[in-house]
Image (cartoon, grey):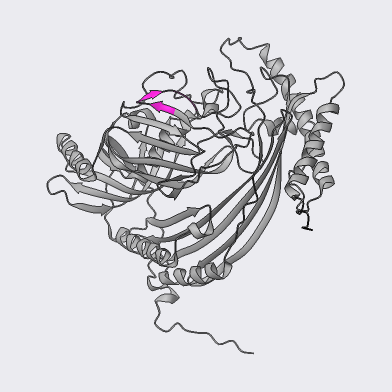
Amino acid sequence: MAAAPAPDARVTLLDAMASELARNQQQLKMQSHEPPYFMSYQLKDYEQTAVAARYGAIFMDDSYRERKLYVDVRVGSYDFDSSVPEGFEFSFSTKGTSYISRKEGPLDDSPLALRTALWLITDEKYKSALFQYLKKKGEDVYSVEDPKRPPSFTKEKPSTLVQPAVPAPFNRERWVKLSREVSGLFNAHPELFDSEVRVTADKVTRLFVSTEGSRIISEEVLYGLHVSAVTRAPDGQLLDDSRDFYSPTEVGLPDDAKVREAAAKVIEELLALRAAPAIDPYTGPAILAPEASGVLFHEAVGHRLEGDRQDGDNEGKTFKGQVGKAVLPTFLSIHDDPSLKVLNGEPLNGYYQFDEEGVKGQRVTLVEKGVLRNYLLGRRPAEGFLQSNGHGRSQGTLKPVARMANLIVDSTKAVSDAELKKLLINEAKRQGKPYGLIIRDITGGNTNTSNYGYQAFKGVPRMVYRVDVKTGQESLVRGVEIVGTPLSAVNRILASGQKQGIFNGFCGAESGNVPVSTVAPAILLQEMELQRAMEGKDRPPILASPAALKEPAVQKVSP
């Protein structure tokens, strides 16, 4: 007789969460006050293994595991409840109490321990929700009633998923050997005074239950391989370069030869940047290669289409009230699709099945032929959009807010790379510029969406080439940052390239760091402003690196 299958510990824990949730739903109530109308529990089980090497030696070899709990308790109704914007809840929850419950779950698969931890957090969250609800009702007395104010929370159908367990193997022997070997390649170039080869495996198992009836068990695995180095130019400017690879499977990471090639390319580019001249601030036409273009759309457009940013006294609300109006050139469309796992054979970081609020991730058309159609939405509605499209995301125990996943830019005005360069030169000539710019690589960017300060974004280009309008010759330069205002920048796009590029990485915002991807073609901007980068004046190391010595001195230690 075949042995019965081993019980799934994940299901046992999910049942424990559901039991504690049901108990609180039926019994949790403070005298003379409302009970919760909605509650949800989420457990995130994080497992990470990491190996990192520098100078040909292992500096880190570690494994780590933790379980984090997030409890959402809401008092009131879907139309008007106790929820407040991220950043305000903590100050309310500590009012009048000297104890804050810990938000960790047990590493042992103990239903009783898990229920006890959830019980204590739920009690704290309910008291905080009551305080917030009463305070909001009191503030409403002094506020003009807004007939267009959206409800506090969306009504969603319950979801059910029990995803099979996903293995997360880690060939420690291979990665230790490879990272040690590849990091040693930088020793031959002591001008690059620091470098690292890092390999990571991250697995997140998520258990979610809600009083609406959702029961979700999902698992996500992400491997990362990073080769990075830094140096200083003769004038003191700090220069960095890297190659980053991501994959949902270990076999999807590059083979040993490709990792060595990546290290060689980082070395080559940094040595070239050290020798490149710094240029003055620039305003004029520029081509952004696909990855750099993706960062521009992510910072200048994507963040401003997140639903939570369409409301709130502190938000700039760049695109509020613009649905149905032209916000981009007519040849551009943008959508976000968390359900897309792979594109053109390359995995996408922003893939997931259900968001942190238990809603299935859905493809959303944000901009269609230049016209704004929708926003990225979690369960906090925006005016005119009363349902979530599965974009409520967060890291750890932070409160979920609407975030990007896989942002994809399409263009109907696409030309070859050669034609795009020709258009750049023609535009530079028309503007009377001696050169145009091509930005082929970028480290990332940041943006301000609040109403404090200017509505602006910044990008940090890495490989910038000056294109002579007379000869078309390209020469590497350094020392500038992309700056601009979002609407001005994106409405000066003249054309795009034909091939889309993929930028995989992580995005940081008020709900933490979440994995994202941006897919975009190269674009030609009629005008881009570049300001001088922060000028470093630090001296490089005074002595030569020991790696630069033919026979490093070895100090004998007396017994």
Residue 533 placed where, x, y %? 36, 47
**Residue 469 within the magenta-colored segment of the rendering:** no
Residue 185 placed where, x, y %? 41, 71
| Apparent side of residue 219 relative to residue 277 in the rendered image (left or right) | right
Question: Residue 543, can we see it?
Answer: no
Residue with the most extreme right position: 31
- Nearer-the-camera pick, 190 or 49: 49
* Range shown magenta: 366-375
Residue 323 placed where, x, y %? 44, 19
Residue with the most extreme left position: 470
Q: Is residue 306 above or below residue 2?
A: above
Q: Quadrant of residue 74?
A: top right
Q: Quadrant of residue 400?
A: top right
- Nearer-the-camera pick, 246 or 536: 246
| Apparent side of residue 50 relative to residue 323 in the rendered image (left or right) | right
Residue 51 placed where, x, y %? 56, 64
Q: Quadrant of the N terminus?
A: bottom right
